[in-house]
Image (tube, helix red, strand yellow):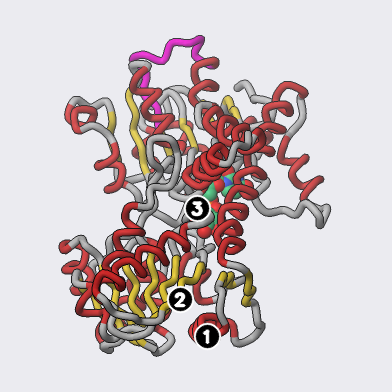
Amino acid sequence: MNITVVGSGYVGLVTGACIAEMGNTVYCVDVDKTKIDNLKQGILPIYEPGLEEIVTDNHQSGRLHFTTSLSEAVEQSEVFFIAVGTPPGEDGSADLRYVLEVANQIGDMLTAPAIVVNKSTVPVGTADLVRAAVAARLEARGVDIEFSVVSNPEFLKEGAAVNDFMHPDRIVIGADNEHARQVMSALYAPFIRNRPRTMFMGIRDAEMTKYAANAMLATKISFMNEIASLCERLDVDVENVRLGIGSDERIGYHFIYAGCGYGGSCFPKDVKALINIAHQNDFEPKLLQAVESRNDQQKHSLFNKLSTHFNGDLSGRTFAVWGLAFKPGTDDMREAPSVVLINSLINAGAKVRAYDPVARETARREFPESWFTDGRLQIVEGQYEAAIDADALCLVTEWKPFRRPDFRALKKLLNTPLIIDGRNQYDREQVKREGFSYYGIGRQPVQA
Ligand code: UDX
């Protein structure tokens, strides 16, 4: 098949590369010329395990094309994926400007029957807007070309995106006609050869499925974070509670880790957007609002623990931060708890020395230049280097090399033997034996 994917971000690039990997010809279109030029040379805009390899292979073998010109792709393609950003507007609603602009362009250029697929996460009803936009442009051209609009939300996780796409646990296709269902089935068939996992449903059902999935996962996390706060007050260890409840199959072990808050490009944005959708439909989404506010509060938990420990005065102190990415396996820092922590520490007059295995470049772009030049914030090249003369070590992202550190070496390097563990990675008894004071999430602190 010949496919066009508009938007070469996380979702678009992974979709394009994985579909090309299955033998299709794919045009990846993006307005960002630098991004496209780089991709042609094998330089990727994001870090994602396994992606570089399939992008390079498929580009070299002529199945994966990169272009800034939709018109170059349009004549060749029967399926158009829209995978451009839907950033939150000021009120939290998903900004559909880019999605609709792509729909307009498709309408301006289409020469043969096509299927337009919404891959971006978009509010219920967006497919109707896309259909109207394409139809209006076709009409303005005075041409009559058949096209369908399909909602095919993406459930890939950053850091595992290629694997998720190659081995999906479900493919949701919202379509209103048999032809579109057949084309989409044929496209995805190579990915689900062992077990059929395609779910066909109405277009609006598919749009809602994506929001509901992310909101459910965010709710599990915020719920656990709330339980964790109670555990701290009741001398209970949330880690035992997690194991105790996770063993119930109805609850399950996934996404019930208490921590310093969820981040990333999806959960915060999608929960906000769903709240906005509710408001637009005269509905008060009390649970979703609580999920969001619980998470905002949770991102301050590490700072609050430090502040309590040092009696409210952190000025002049230096803190080591391990982990900047919003989760392991990515260099993405969007909505990361590390950003909230570092901002709070620096605003409180402290200095920060931070390390992340892959997000160091992202971090250099994230914070004001002056913080680096006057030494308030240093991004260092090694995890132990971050700890030198620091008054505490804060674990924010649970990258594997942070899980079993050399506590003896750490203790020698730190000014104060204090660990603030935002992901409950360490054994309380062990850190106590090693002579550290320790604060986790949802468990009793240990005093050295
Ligand atoms: C998520 C969804 O998982 C994916 O299906 C959707 O398509 C996009 O949004 P992603 O943003 O890549 O994917 O991250 P995910 O792995 O889901 O983690 C989100 C955040 O939740 C991270 O900050 C993580 O640290 C946090 N988290 C996760 C917890 O705090 N506790 C948990 O138990 C699980």
- Percent position (x, y) of residue 330? 41, 55
Residue 20 is drawn in which quadrant?
A: bottom left
Cβ(mark 3) to ligand 1 < 8 Å? Answer: no
**For the point 20% across and 68% down, which residue is it?**
36
Q: Main secondary structure of the magenta part?
A: loop
On residue 81, which mark appears? none
Left or right: where 64 falls relative to 409? left
**Magenta residues, start to end:** 309-320
Q: Amino acid at mark 1?
A: His
Q: Residues within 10 Å of mark 3 (few under 14, many from 20)?
A: many
Q: Is residue 7 above or below residue 22?
A: above
Whether residue 440 can be seen here: yes
Q: Amino acid at mark 3?
A: Pro
Q: Which residue is mark 1?
A: 179
Which of 61/330 is in front? 61
Tell me the element at label 3. Answer: loop
On residue 123, which mark appears? 3
